[in-house]
Amino acid sequence: MFALAFAGGFEDGVPNAKRVQAMLAAFPASASEGATTAEAGHAVAGILRWAVVRRDLRVAPRWDPVRQLLFAGDVRLHNRPELAQLLDLPEPIEELSDLELAWVAYTTWGEEAPRRLVGDFAFVVWDEGRRRLFACRDHLGVRPLYYSVMTDGVAVASDVRQLLPLIPRPYDDVDADRVLSRLLHVARRPGATFFSSISLVQPGHSLFLEQGKKREIRHWDPPREPRRAASYEDNCAELLHLFRRAVHDRLESEHPLVAHSSGGFDSSTILMASADIYRDESGRPPLVMASALTPGFPCDDGRFIDAVTAKVPFEHVSWSVVETAPAPRSLEPLLIHPAFRRGLGSGPRRDLDLAMERGARVLLGGTYGDEVLFAGGVHLDMFRGGRWGELLRETMVLRNPRGRGGRMLMESLLGVLPPPVALRVRKKLFQRPPAPPPWLGPLLEPLRPSKAQREDEPERSWPSHLAYTLWSQMTGTKVTGVLDGIVLYATEAGLEMRLPFADVRLVEHLLTVPWEQRFPHGHLRRFGRDALEPLLPELFSNRTGQGDWGPVSVANAKRLASFMGQVLHDGPWHSAPFVDRHKARGMFREVNRVSGAAAANTWTLLLELVALESWLRALFCYNPPAR
């Protein structure tokens, strides 16, 4: 794992070295194995290192006086052999770190290099002669990359908290529109953070910045032509092959690994594929399964976890998500956004503790599986293709008390429109922003949620509604926000988060499977199940869904009732511009008098309001880490 800190100046005399040292000191993980810096005339770059494999020990920022380029980044590549065949390497590939390999790629292909890299990466290049910054982020955004443009220069970092020391008063820099989007549960603006002065490079994008003028362009344009020559069976076999390779690549480590084991389809397929690899390749470091259990709740997947545990050679450690220990009197807020430091399912962070106890450097997770395997939009293709009888049968099979089948049939009529237009209409009809609630404060009350995300240009051609829906979902701010959250969760413990389903090769294959091969037949993840289910224990063959996690969230929120009441009633109310304190107190008084869905939603909302206030109090008293 690596952490990047970069500062460049548009003019002479900018304190770049001081800024980089402040950013390195502010990184939230524990002490690193080493910090290295490199300087150009008007820029400085630094890297913190936690070596996962031996070649990571060579990672350091680079200043090339001949090319007048300063280079640094956080890079983990999965196509090293392919790159070795394409590049004229200065030494054997085994000796080169992934960052060094990315540098050779950049010096060979320039700003086209990100298109050739496969893996998780974020890096910056400073052109000293032009005082120009180029920064890029991997295709799906597994490696975060934040930046702040100031009057005299620019700063880039791996974490928002690294940039806070460069903001005079972070409390005054809070972005009200971003707060509103979180409280109303609508997607944020692309590239937005909770601070007006800090932005996020979007996944699959490159940032160009020169003399304060910036532009951001997409460097990843996915394949558009469906693989019509391949049969359904061939496409399933190819998905299984790509998935096994994605898991294999992400098991590379010379230290122990911790893998999330939730009992769901995604984490279970990762563990079963990992078990096959461990049996075939001896000498690998220990892998420990970590399971957050919910015994007695509708979402309890203990029997599925047990079925996987019985099939794999890994140690298994589990704990209850609903804590039985006394509730804490305070919760440390995250400075990056209004949330508390909580673990899986809002329970204990036992997986991170386990990693520290075992000396692990990698956390393996199933995030992104739902997004890439779900056949959203295929019913529009069925309507457009005249498969009306099959479409009607699907809506009958998928009918449930929430009217899912009926809505699916209504949405299908939009199949006559081009995919980008149809998706916009679907959002307008079925995902309308909620009305402003009565508890909004004066700064938020006149606002309305911004557009969820920037759409691709309508003139771009897409082969199907399925492909475009999948693409839009993967690159949308809701999904990328979840991805950012899980990666930063691991970062705080000095762990490198690895996500096999967020593999660009696997995703590009899914985008090219013809819609005619992805009919749900009663299950919108049928294709993924047909391809990957051979990995799983027999118990999974009849599984169709997962129980509701809502009761778990309510139970954990109720445990914190005393703390929540203290925040709502005592001390300053820094949330006044955003939340009416009087109405929040009234909600807290009433929530114990009602039950059902209304009470569950109120408990969850109150915890979010308390997190917001705790976060703002921390920002108001913020002092940069000592250097």
Image: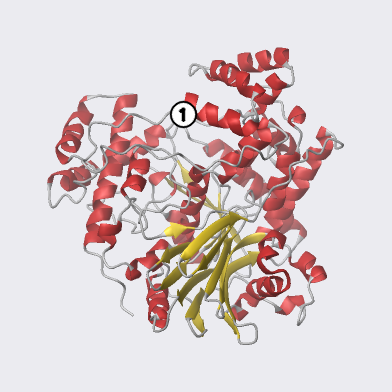
Q: What percent of the width, then of the height, locates residue 482?
A: 49, 47
Q: What percent of the width, then of the height, locates residue 106?
A: 68, 71
In the rendered image, the vertical position of residue 576 relative to residue 356, given as above or below: above
Q: What percent of the width, then of the height, locates residue 425?
A: 54, 27
Please give left or right for residue 609 compared with residue 366 in the image: left
Please give left or right for residue 345 compared with residue 613 in the image: right
Residue linked to disc 1: 431
Where is the N terminus found, in terms of image quarters? Answer: bottom right
Count of numbered circles in the view: 1
In the rendered image, the vertical position of residue 571 relative to residue 416, given as above or below: below
Q: Amino acid at mark 1?
A: Gln
Where is the C terminus found, in terms of image quarters? Answer: bottom left
Please give left or right for residue 606 compared with residue 265 in the image: left
Q: What percent of the width, then of the height, locates residue 23?
A: 40, 73
Q: Residue at x 81, y 39 (%)?
A: 227
In the rendered image, the vertical position of residue 196 relative to residue 238, given as above or below: below
Q: Nearer the viewer, residue 230 or 251?
A: 230
Q: Nearer the viewer, residue 156 or 396?
A: 156
Q: Residue at x 30, y 77 (%)?
A: 626
